Image: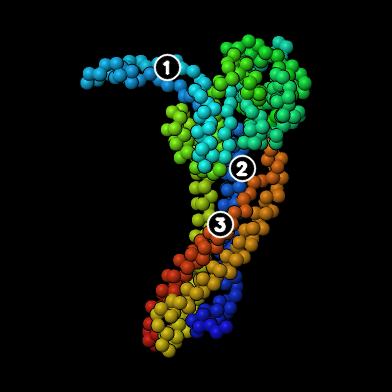
Amino acid sequence: MKISVNTEIALTYLSARKKQTAVASLGVMFGISMFIFMQSLMKGTNDYFEKMSFNSTPHIRLYSENKVADTHMLTSYLTDPSVKILTNPKQLIQSQGLTNPYGIIKEIQRNQQIANVTPQVTADVIYTSGSVQINGNVAGVNIDQEDKMFDVQSNMLVGDLHDLNRVNNGLLIGKGVADKLSLHLGDNITVTSGTGSPTIMKVVGIFATTVKQIDDTKSYANIVQAQNLLGKDRSYVTDIKINLKDYNNAPQVAREIETLTGYKAEDWVKANEQLKAAFKIRAIILNSVIGVILLVAGFGIYNILNMTIYEKIKEIAILKAQGFSGPAVTSIFLQQAIYIGVMGGLVGITCGFGITYMVSRIYIGAGTLKYLPMSFYVPHYIEAICFGILTTIAAGFFPARKASKVDPVTIIRG
């Protein structure tokens, strides 16, 4: 394939200075490798923590929010234009249960973005075993739907979660509850709610989410059993948990569900604001480090091309004397920067993949985390090579422009 004269000269200059070219390419390679590694680490850890939060938190939770009294009733009763003022407002007395929950579920399921919906009855209880008592909460659920949404089975230590549907008064308890009350599979435990009578229940399974607050307090019961604990009828539901096909749409869908039902719809973003803030801070830190690395690589290319121009100043003057225009000379040196960027980029994405893979095999063995979470996300590799090439073009532009302004008459005379 025939190449242009400018390209041939650029390649000649690069091959004539092999060490400098290799050093510049290594700088780009290192920057791109670190870009890929850090982006993979950041996305991998973010995905892991999001997955962990979704093990117990739905994308959207629908519930009856406690409301504080306002001037709405005063305005309805006193229709005159006077200003209504409510002093020392108190929380309104209202039921924690949802009105017509199963009708609400049918309406929610009409939304094409919904993946799963399940009702829940939440009960604050006291667990008693012998003379030991601890506070906790029972989640009354349809265990099949719960497992489909949150993969409860993966957290089971002993027992079969489906025994909740087969054993009367069956209870799945967290490992922390089991340890504090010295309970094992098949043991009995007394569970008392604030509005119901004490109920003897049988431990049919023990789970561990590795989240201490959950494992130390939470248990699962059949939804009918939870309603019995509270002394409620079969229509009593405190929460509706919703998972979407794309959890990123949760804030928007939550607002739609609030408008539809009139109840509070809390999306996972609001429920995990501290986690999202941590993600943003980590992204700023890592991107700053990556930017500094590529900036250093860019300065290396800038210095090498500057040295090339200084050493080849007479050759550049001869080229211009032979009729090479300023843009042609700019093209020669800009091409050198691009070739350095391409060579460094190709090696960099290969090294970045290799480093990411090796780090992903580092054993952690903490809780449910076996290996360091890394992401092999293809757009990161595309972004890396594009970012690397743009950096080298920016670094090579100013030396190339300087070369294009060389006055051949002055150089040859001098």
- Determine crowd level at label 1: few under 14, some 14-19, many 20+ residues with C-alpha closer than 10 A: few
Dot 3 lies on which element? helix
Q: Secondary structure at mark 2?
A: helix
Q: Is residue 210 visible?
A: no
User: How would you rate the neighbour count of disc 3 (Cα within 10 Å): few for under 14, some for 14-19, many for 20 or more?
Assistant: few
Q: Nearer the viewer, mark 1 or mark 2?
A: 1
Q: Amino acid at mark 2?
A: Tyr
Disc 1 marks which amino acid?
Leu
Q: Residue at x 46, y 21 (%)?
A: 66
Q: Which residue is drawn at the image coordinates 71% and 21% (left, top)?
A: 170
Mark 2 vs 3, N-terminal side: 2
In the picture, residue 406 is in which quadrant? bottom left
Please give the residue where the numbered disc 2 appears in the rendered image.
48
| Residue at which label 1 appears | 92
Return the residue at label 3: 379
Q: Name above or below for residue 14 compared with residue 45.
A: below
